[in-house]
Image (cartoon, grey):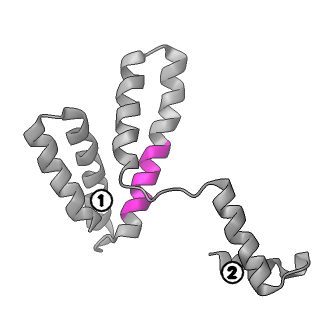
Amino acid sequence: MLKEQLMQDLKDAMKEKDTVKKDTVQMVRAAILQIEKDKGIEVDDAKIIEIIAKEVKTKKDALVDFEKGGRQDLIDQTNAEIEILSKYLPKQLSKEEIKEIVQNIVNDLGATSMKDMGPVMKEAK
């Protein structure tokens, strides 16, 4: 499903002449096609999310260097790319949401000590 969404977004970006979005989506599609070609497999949504998350991390790391170099043009472009890529990633849970989920699991399992950590972690996955 994400693959089709990327293709549709690429078409839309081309129609709108949005070069940043077009280039960003093409970069992700190229990474997907490379993995499919190298491994001879059909990439699923989970793997696509993994690829996109890796790209976002790479871009955030590059952002630090651009800021050190005072390259505002690259900072703006990289921020735009990160924003585009983030739309394809699932929403991240806040610390409070994670805390609440873990507390519910601890209560449900009746965990009382560190010995119960294994089952709690297994359930949290």
Number of other residues with Cα within 10 Å of mark 2, as a class: few under 14, some 14 to 19, many 20 or more:
few
Q: Residue furthest right?
A: 113
**Which residue is outermost to the left?**
15
Foreground label between 1 and 2: 2
Percent x, y for residue 93? 58, 58
Residue 25 covered by magenta stretch = no
Q: Which residue is mark 2?
A: 122
SS for dot 2: helix
From this view, report whether residue 70 is shown above or below residue 83: above
Pointer 1 residue = 32
| Quadrant in which the C terminus appears | bottom right
Name which residue lies at 13% across and 46% down. Answer: 12
Q: Label 1, label 2: how many angstroms apart (C-alpha)?
A: 30 Å
Q: Tell me which segment is drawn in magenta.
A: 48-57
Q: 31 or 15: nearer the eye? A: 15
> Is 1 on the left or on the right of 12, as rendered?
right
